[in-house]
Amino acid sequence: MNFSNIFNQIFVLFFLILIGYVSRKINVFNDSGTKGLSDLVLKITLPAMIIQSMQKEFSPELLGKVFQIVIISTVVYLVSFIISLFFPKLIGSSKDELGAYKFALVFSNVGFMGFPVIKAAFGNDALFYTAIYNLPFNFLVFTLGIVLLANNKEKNKFDLKMFLNPGIISVLIGMIIFIFSIKLPTAVDETLSLLGSVTTPLSMLVIGSLLAKSSIKNIFSNPKVYIISFARLFLMPIIVYFILKPFVNDYLMIGIPLLITAMPVAANSAILAEEYGGNAELSSQTVFISTLLSIISIPLILKWFVA
């Protein structure tokens, strides 16, 4: 792995985020425009990238790795959840803050930042395993995530229909293609490839636009947000690394979980908090600070544990 190339890729992502931020501030994007771009990424381009990346020839060995990455992902989320139960209380979080901080420690930004960074670090082949790793996220974020954010509010309900989201559907389609070694027509394959190729720039523009909605003064004046962001970006991946290292020898099987755990807070936390009666403002702050700090933390995690 060429660390300088990875570092440059991280800065490319940062500049794209900055362009999205400025575009929102000068009204190139508005709420509906940002929502449209977000929907385009989550419902069209990211699923296209996932499906296209899962066109691999079936083999028992590869299937074994699929089961391995699912087990690893489940363990990582279990450990993250356990840590989220006590860490926010250790820093004196109020009841109104607990939900946002618990969510921040469990759910990282896989869709918007995880896939692009994994691709930059490990190449296209790693996207297959990342899509599989992301399966528990898609199930948990709409169940456990909502429970955490709602924090025992009356709106603490979830709809089973939310499981039928494009992320899960695309992985299921991809699994069928993989298991039966289906070869897509060239035109379809190239269409998926072109759609998937715009996922990274569009994702970063969306993050920048979302960050532009936050109050800078409120964000930078809350020390707990910095502590939670530090835990999200450094503490969680370090814990994951030392848990997995004694049992996992495969480079990708450690590198992918480590990098995904090192991503900033999931960008949809504020949206879910708003919908289910959580602290949307605080959720936005954790996204903002953790995303900014990730420009420093991701290269460091790569250098220390992956490169």
Image: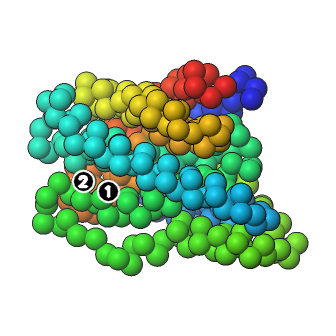
Instruction: Please tell me in which quadrant of the rendered image residue 278 appears.
Output: bottom left
Q: Is residue 188 visible?
A: no
Question: x, y (%) of residue 205?
Answer: 57, 47
What residue sits 23% from the left and 70% below the top? 157
Instruction: Please tell me in which quadrant of the rendered image residue 149 appears.
Output: bottom left
Residue labelled with disc 1: 145
Are discs 2 and 1 less than 8 Å apart at CB? yes
Disc 1 residue type (three-letter): Gly
Using a 10 Å C-alpha cutoff, classify the residue at mark 1 as few (fewer than 14 neighbours), some (14 to 19) or many (20 or more): many
What residue sits 22% from the left and 42% below the top? 85
Q: Please state, as top left, top right, bottom left or bottom right, where the C terminus lies in the image.
A: top right
Secondary structure beneath dot 1 equals: helix
Question: x, y (%) of residue 222?
Answer: 25, 28
Residue labelled with disc 2: 148
Q: Is residue 232 above or below residue 34?
A: above
Q: Is residue 288 above or below residue 156?
A: above
Which mark, residue 224?
none
Residues 133 and 107: in front is 133
